[in-house]
Amino acid sequence: MTMEMKDSGSVVLTAYHPHSPARIPGMEQSFVQDAPASHSPASRKSLPRCRRINRMLSNESASPSAFSRSNSQASMDSTSMEDFWCEVENIKESSEDGSEEATLLEFKPADEGELEAEWLQDVGLSTLISGAEEEDGQALLSTLTRTQAAAVQKRYNTYTQTLRKKNKHTVRDVRDIFGTSDSSLPFETVPVSPVPSNGIQLPGQKPVWKSVTSNSCLDCGLDKGSPSITEELSYEVSFSESIMILPKTQEWPKNQRFKKEDSTLPKFIIRKSRFGLTEVGDLSPEDMKKIRYLSLIELTAFYDALGVELKRNRAERVRGRENGLFGVPLTILLENDQKKVPGIKVPLIFQKLLRKLEETGLETEGILRVPGSASRVKNLHQELEAKFYEDTFDWDQVRNNDAAGLLKMFIRELPSPLFTIEYLPAFITLVEKISKIKLQLQALHLLIMLLPEANRDTAKAFLQFLKKVVANEGKNKMNLWNVSMIVAPNLFIYKGKRANQQEMQAAATTAHIVRLLIRYQDILWTVPSFLISQVRKMNEAAMNNSKRQLMFDKGVRKLLRRKTIERERPERPEGAVTFPPYLQSDIPEGVIRVYAPLHSKVSMAIQLNSQTKVKDILARFHCENSRGSSQNVRGQIQSLHEIGGNIGQHCLDPDAYMLDVYRANPQAEWVIKPKAS
């Protein structure tokens, strides 16, 4: 049986742009040829067709073309990508038999200046378009680094020049926005010195570093007997500021290869400062929104510093279902699930499929690669839609390979890709145009910070499962590269139009992206400390603006005169707790009052010194309350939270030094409570 590439039901790699500018000379990368992976008998009947596709693509890519070849096109052999093309064919067949419903993404060409306007809105600077003098925009601009400010200025200049050409309304001059007398930046053109994650440089204090390796993630699929390169990652300085400027005559290394062996990937060491590390779930939603603004600005500045264009798609409309399980937008699916399980962050159906595979399928040979029965998967799909929310579905009848098929179907049928349609081009670009894996990882880190909360939480659950699959390689025969090749087409393709030659050639690129996502996922869920520093500065600037506004408000001043006894207090942030006045008395410098409303002893004054850590405070409360607290409280994992001041809410790292955190935010309240799941 032969396979033909048909117009209907084909797949297309979303993020590849055939009309992109020529590649940087010497950046072609290739994959070292490897022996073909062993396949189980259940999958052998489709291998000849997969090999035919590989041979066809290899022959066509060998002929001259009008465009430069990308990394993934260079020296791509037929056996190294065999699993990828088999998976593409399985997806195509499932689309043709009607088991997957078509979900269309409609696009509208961008007019000149529209992309810049959308970018300014996405980074929280819509005030530059409207001309309004809003505090949030001013606070954001006041925190930008030199390279970040240059990125904003570049986009705003393009936007204003376009408006002037179109003879539209008068626009603000960039010099008015940045407060300069000319068009140059209001920053010294020198690298920014390292700043602690709190955003405040403590006088006379040198940073103390602690080496922390993400072994649970970085040893995934690693050959323990092979040497591995170790590199250091620092979150103290913005990525764009730390890029070394290369001479214009310098070229990217030629004939650089991506090797598929897991041991060739570098092992990164994270430097944990005295303020510890912060995961994405440790900050309040309001502060994470600001992290997204800053991440997009930083990503743009990072690409600008590398001389790479940051491309994005424009999705005009997404057609999706409003009820059911498959083909429903994540936000709607979570809204429906939260009516049943309040506070849930990952769709129930997705959690159940992952749990099923983790309980029974991790040791199944060829899991994810060997397809289940198409007819069974179709019937299970229909049965799940009818019975899942009624709790009448029989999970014991589901075979492991069929469950894997349903899991991949769920991801493919999302109306908008898991990594969002807007920034899929940026994922592809980080591999095609950036040669060093450390720089690729930094770009990938910022892209993860950009994801909407629902997408990020779902992606995290999925990648944690994939890490477990790779950890069982000895039994399931699925190493990191095998899993990456199978998962890539499910994450980076969409249905709707014909796949062309250039788009199909991005296969190796997407597989490498998935490999980085799986291997370094523990790093990717950590919020860079320089972004937290900027959020603190944003909040401080906003508070100062509010204070100035109150001082000049005559009505407020009259009110204050009538109530001279009362003190003006800022609005208490969500999550803060209220205690009797005798517990709110003035506290000496270096002493904090910690509240634990769920414990028998709800408050305790603690003297801090330079060596006091968060875990020491938690241990003291645990000792004091080991008998009086309820069994439910003793069974929960308690964390110390920083609430208010220059942060919304921040769950602190147990290894953070408390005196440093206190000095960074002396107006905060300190509350012990369970960490949000």
Image (cartoon, rainbow, N blue to C red):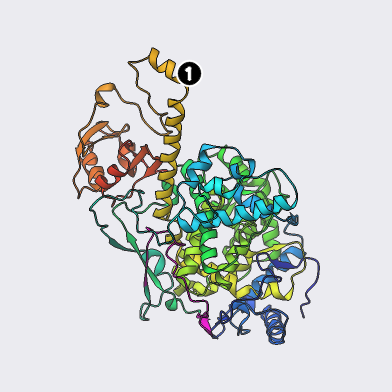
Which portion, as a residue range, is magenta? 231-259
Q: Quadrant of the C terminus?
A: top left
Dominant secondary structure of the magenta stretch? loop
Residue 43: x percent and y percent?
63, 76
Question: Is 433 above or below relative to 333?
Answer: below
Question: Is 231 above or below relative to 206?
Answer: below
Task: Give the residue drawn at x 57%, y 83%.
Answer: 36
Give neighbour class at mark 1: few <14, some 14-19, many 20+ (Cα, 10 Å). few
Q: Is 256 a magenta residue? A: yes
Question: Is 55 above or below relative to 165?
Answer: below
Task: Give the residue drawn at x 55%, y 59%.
Answer: 300
Task: Give the residue drawn at x 56%, y 37%.
Answer: 133
130 vs 107, left or right, is: left
Residue 541: x percent and y percent?
43, 40
> According to the image, label 1 marks what residue?
555
Q: Nearer the viewer, residue 420 or 287?
A: 287
Q: Nearer the viewer, residue 197 or 144?
A: 144
